[in-house]
Image: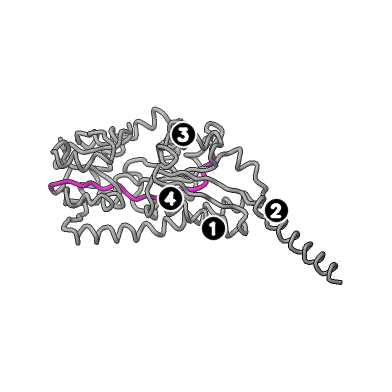
Amino acid sequence: MKRIGFFILALALFGAGFAATAAAADKVVIKMAGMKPEGEPETLGMHKFGEILAQLSGGKYEVQVFPNSQLGKEDAYIASTRKGTIQMCATGTQTSALHPAMAMLETPMLFDNLDHARRAMEGKTFELINDGFSEKSGLRTLNAFPLGFRHFYSKKPLKDMADLKGLRMRVPNIPLYINFAKECGISGQPMPFAEVPSALDQGVIDGGDSPFADIVALKMYEITPQITMSGHILVIHSLYINEKFYQGLPDQDKEWVNQAARESADYVWKLMAKIEEDAQKQITDGGGTVSKPSPEFREAMKDAGKRSWKLFYDTVPNAKEILESAESYK
């Protein structure tokens, strides 16, 4: 009897071990790369996607998040995702190199506020921008979420367009941003964001523009205390997945991925309003001044923004349809 008991126990242990091994073998690891550090909206959204997908799949999927350019700069990890070396990434308009319409995610002076932008990004506008993207890139865009509106930071107050004229302002080295600065009368100075504090200290530039999260992260308000809530460009990022990997998933698993993408984007959209509110308080508590442009100033900026749209008409076949669609969500 003892031998039978030991035999049954051994079988039970073997079965448990086999089940655990099988479960481990069934687990699918998804590697996701991003550029922002921990604590910023992009990275929070990446982590949230992983949490939701793990819950929906009962632990079948484990998303490993690599923020802060740990897997290389944007171009490098986008290429890795296209090749399938990694399965997912988060990025913004860098994908316009593959599909020019993606640059229109950050069209100057297109959105009045976050609610307007969200309606467009969850509606037809987003579909029009992505039309043909997967076929060209080998990537699938899963969602769209905000990193915040870009606002001016400067050493002196900005009350109208005349105050912008001739200002040496840092801009990202992206044609769209450089062109918009030119239309505003700004002397755009392309440079990496990491070089901005020293450039301000040395008087190389007079200011720049960034979302509140970046302004607060580097405490820009200590060097350039005048923050003007121009909100001229909404920075929008997305989660991308390798199309071949996605198409190889069972239908149920695809729905889990899609649902995780929707819910993680929803999380960031809701979070953004609080991030901007908290940032304004931190800036004013730190001695900075946050001001809103006058209606006349904002209208003049809208005119400058519309002039910069010519770049899209020259490069994006359905640009007019995209712009009209975004307008319809006001």
Query: Which is closer to the viewer, label 2 or label 4?
Result: 2
Q: Amino acid at mark 2?
A: Ala
Element on which disc 2 rests: helix
Which SS class for mark 3?
loop
Please, what is the three-letter code of the amino acid marked with disc 1? Answer: Ile
How is colour applied across the structure in the image? one colour
Classify mark 4: helix, strand or loop. Answer: strand
**Mark 3 and mark 4 residues within 8 Å of each other at the beta carbon:** no
Query: Residue 52 has which mark?
Result: 1
Which picture quadrant has residue 324? top left
Q: Which residues are magenta?
A: 140-156
Give the labeled residue for mark 4: 145
Q: Is residue 101 visible?
A: no
**Percent coordinates x, y for residue 124 in the rendering:** 49, 45
If you read the primary sequence from the N terminus, does the residue marked by circle 2 or circle 4 appear first? 2
Q: Is residue 288 magenta?
A: no
Q: Which is closer to the viewer, label 2 or label 1?
A: 2
Instruction: Work out how far the residue at label 1 is from the one at label 3, CA to CA, in angstroms.
Output: 35 Å
**In this orientation, which residue lies closer to the viewer: 166 or 53?**
53
Compare residues 23 and 133 and report the one nearer the observer.
Answer: 23
Residue drawn 24% across the image and 60% down it? 282
Cα–Cα span, label 2 and label 4? 37 Å
Q: Mark 4 or mark 1: which is in front?
A: 1
Magenta highlight on residue 153: yes
**Residue tagged 2:** 22
Whichever of callouts 3 and 4 sits on the residue coming sooner in the sequence is 4
Q: Earlier in the sequence, mark 2 or mark 1?
A: 2
Q: Position of residue 145 (x, y in %)?
A: 43, 50
Q: From the viewer's perspective, tell me whether residue 167 is left or right of residue 183.
A: left
Q: Which residue is mark 3?
A: 318
Q: Position of residue 217 (x, y in %)?
A: 28, 52
